[in-house]
Amino acid sequence: MAMAKPAASPKVAPSSVQPGLRRGRWVLLGFAVLAGMIVLAWPRVEGYAMTGSAYGARVACSCRFVGGRPLGDCRKDFEPGMDLITLSEDTAARSVTARFPMVARQTATYREGWGCVLEPWSR
């Protein structure tokens, strides 16, 4: 008596079972690595941003209120690489505020006999 062989089920490659799930894992891993890099680099970025904005405020304040130049002309005195620093002035208070987007902001105020002085840093 001959027995019929059961029909073989088609073999499916494991990589083609759920390609969306495999891609999702790589995307999740990529985001985790990126988040880890940001967490590790944040103190350095924040330090550079605070220093750059303090430097920008002090230099621009001196340029504007000691040198008497327009604020737009004061960017010439910045070091290379300070393109992200933005400046704003308060003529009534005789101060200039420099900002690094979403990270740091520093203000320098002109004081007679002292020149431009940075406001105390706050964290």
Image (tube, rainbow, N blue to C red):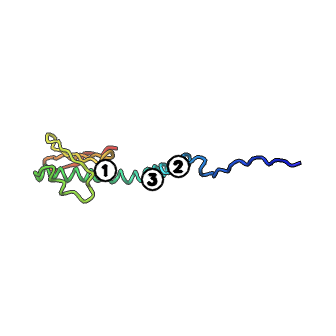
Q: Amino acid at mark 3?
A: Met
Crowd band around label 3 with a 10 angstrom C-alpha radius: few (<14), some (14–19), many (20+): few
| Comes first in the chain, label 3 or label 1 | 3
Secondary structure of residue under mark 2: helix
Residue positioned most to the bottom: 80
| Residue for badge 1 | 50
Horizontal relation, residue 10 to residue 101: left or right:
right
Q: Which mark is residue 37?
A: 3
Residue positioned most to the right: 1
Q: Residue at x 68, y 49 (%)?
A: 10
Are the residues flagged by discs 3 and 1 in contact, CB closer than 8 Å? no
Q: Nearer the viewer, residue 110 or 90?
A: 90
Report, in whole angstroms, how far the alpha carbon at label 2 lies from the one at label 1. Answer: 39 Å
Secondary structure of residue under mark 1: helix
Q: Nearer the viewer, mark 3 or mark 2?
A: 2
Q: Residue at x 31, y 50 (%)?
A: 50
Give the percent coordinates (x, y) of residue 6: 78, 46
Secondary structure of residue under mark 3: helix
Q: Residue at x 32, y 43 (%)?
A: 122
Q: Nearer the viewer, residue 5 or 37?
A: 5
Are the residues flagged by discs 3 and 2 in contact, CB closer than 8 Å? no
Give the percent coordinates (x, y) of residue 87: 21, 47
| Residue for badge 2 | 23
Report, in whole angstroms, how far the alpha carbon at label 3 lies from the one at label 1. Answer: 20 Å
